[in-house]
Image (cartoon, helix red, strand yellow):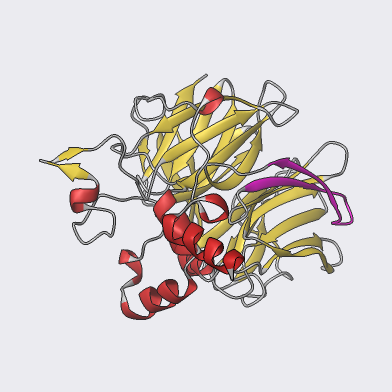
């Protein structure tokens, strides 16, 4: 009885095992304005995926693939539905996942090169692609229960329905390497043959062997939800964080009865959940008095969106970060690539492709 009462009291007071905490942004993650204050980029509707094709950046916006033509973005391929993942090989192949039409492999001009991979149902929530070599494609499936457009629902339902697949591009054979992942959202084939995966809902990076078996947890308990990965010129990696964690959202994730009622009765755009952009409507659950006083953003206020990209070294220790803070506009950073001394970023929440001189 005493143990039961103690547990109830801890839960009521929010302390002990029932406390709700989020790791602080400190050390190499200390907030700054480097991302927000970077030079104006390219205005693009909800850019999502970045990859390097022959050293030049290409990215997705809706169903289009774009690259620079001179100093302006220009579409060079249009798919049948929105692009959810993108990767380029050393041989100039472009792998594209579409929410409703599966995976296609294109040549460097955007023309079909391999057409045998389409399976819209299987790949409806493909979140990331990476070439292990020119003949092998790694695919992250964020969830087998929800499409990518329903990622907030997947978080609130606390699913672990993600997969890592390997596709032999010559034979078309598909092999599942890992399952029950917490929304895998980034993948990279490392030099030793192992595979680095970001798990958004587990807020961590893990290393898997070529067979998909767990080798190591590289980073844990991140202050936000990690997304895609890319190599950094200094030998480490760039990690994008597409939305922040907050004590309020963490609390809601612990309350299944409340979550079910909220999802049943409240419009999805007003759920207490992370977002790619916020502060656009007074209907938002963390808007109004919680965030602003006399029109001024409170510096301690929780935010549903944020802009963050982190560079980690070869040992996965953060060494620097670039931020667009709560009152900024470059939020929802979903991809990053480095080329020629410049960092390219997609701000899906801010409708912008950003470039930063490093």
Front position in the image: 252 or 282: 252
Q: Is residue 75 above or below residue 154?
A: above
Quadrant in the picture for the N terminus: bottom right
- Identified at 47% across, 48% down, the residue is 245
- Identified at 38% across, 34% down, the residue is 324
Considering the whole magenta stretch, tell me its main secondary structure: strand
Tell me residue 351's x, y (percent): 35, 46
Tell me residue 173's x, y (percent): 84, 69
Q: Which residues are magenta?
A: 204-219
Quick check: is 217 in the magenta stretch?
yes
Front position in the image: 195 or 80: 195
- Identified at 87% across, 43% down, the residue is 193
Determine whether, in the image, residue 298 is placed left or right of residue 223. Answer: left
- Identified at 54% across, 68% down, the residue is 99
Determine whether, in the image, residue 150 is placed left or right of residue 327. Answer: right
Q: Is residue 309 above or below residue 186?
A: above
Determine whether, in the image, residue 279 is placed left or right of residue 315. Answer: left
| Residue 300 visible, this angle | yes
């Amino acid at each position: 009885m005493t143990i039961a009462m103690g547990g109830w009291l801890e839960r009521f007071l929010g302390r002990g095992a029932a406390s709700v905490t989020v790791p602080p942004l400190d050390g190499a993650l200390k907030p700054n304005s480097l991302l927000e204050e970077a030079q104006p980029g390219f205005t693009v509707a909800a850019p999502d995926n970045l990859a390097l094709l022959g050293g030049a950046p290409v990215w997705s916006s809706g169903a289009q693939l774009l690259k620079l033509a001179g100093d302006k973005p220009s579409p060079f391929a249009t798919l049948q539905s929105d692009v959810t993942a993108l990767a380029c090989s050393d041989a100039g192949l472009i792998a594209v996942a579409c929410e409703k039409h599966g995976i296609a492999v294109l040549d460097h001009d955007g023309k079909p090169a391999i057409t045998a991979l389409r399976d819209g149902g299987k790949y409806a929530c493909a979140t990331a692609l990476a070439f292990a070599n020119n003949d092998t494609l790694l695919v992250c499936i964020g969830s087998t229960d929800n499409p990518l457009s329903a990622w907030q629902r997947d978080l609130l339902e606390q699913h672990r329905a993600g997969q890592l697949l390997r596709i032999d591009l010559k034979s078309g054979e598909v092999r599942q390497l890992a399952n029950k992942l917490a929304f895998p959202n980034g993948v990279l084939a490392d030099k030793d043959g192992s595979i680095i995966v970001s798990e958004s809902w587990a807020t961590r990076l893990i290393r898997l062997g070529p067979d998909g078996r767990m080798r190591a947890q590289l980073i844990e308990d991140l202050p936000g939800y990690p997304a895609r990965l890319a190599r950094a010129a200094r030998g480490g990696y760039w990690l994008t964080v597409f939305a922040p964690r907050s004590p309020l959202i963490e609390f809601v994730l612990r309350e299944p009865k409340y979550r079910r009622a909220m999802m049943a009765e409240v419009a999805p755009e007003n759920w207490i959940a992370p977002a790619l952009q916020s502060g656009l409507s007074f209907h938002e659950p963390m808007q109004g008095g919680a965030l602003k006083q006399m029109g001024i953003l409170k510096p301690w206020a929780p935010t549903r969106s944020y802009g963050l990209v982190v560079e980690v070294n070869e040992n996965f220790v953060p060494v620097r970060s670039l931020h667009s803070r709560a009152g900024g506009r470059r939020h929802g950073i979903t991809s990053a690539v480095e080329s020629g001394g410049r960092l390219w970023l997609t701000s899906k929440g801010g409708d912008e492709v950003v470039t930063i001189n490093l």
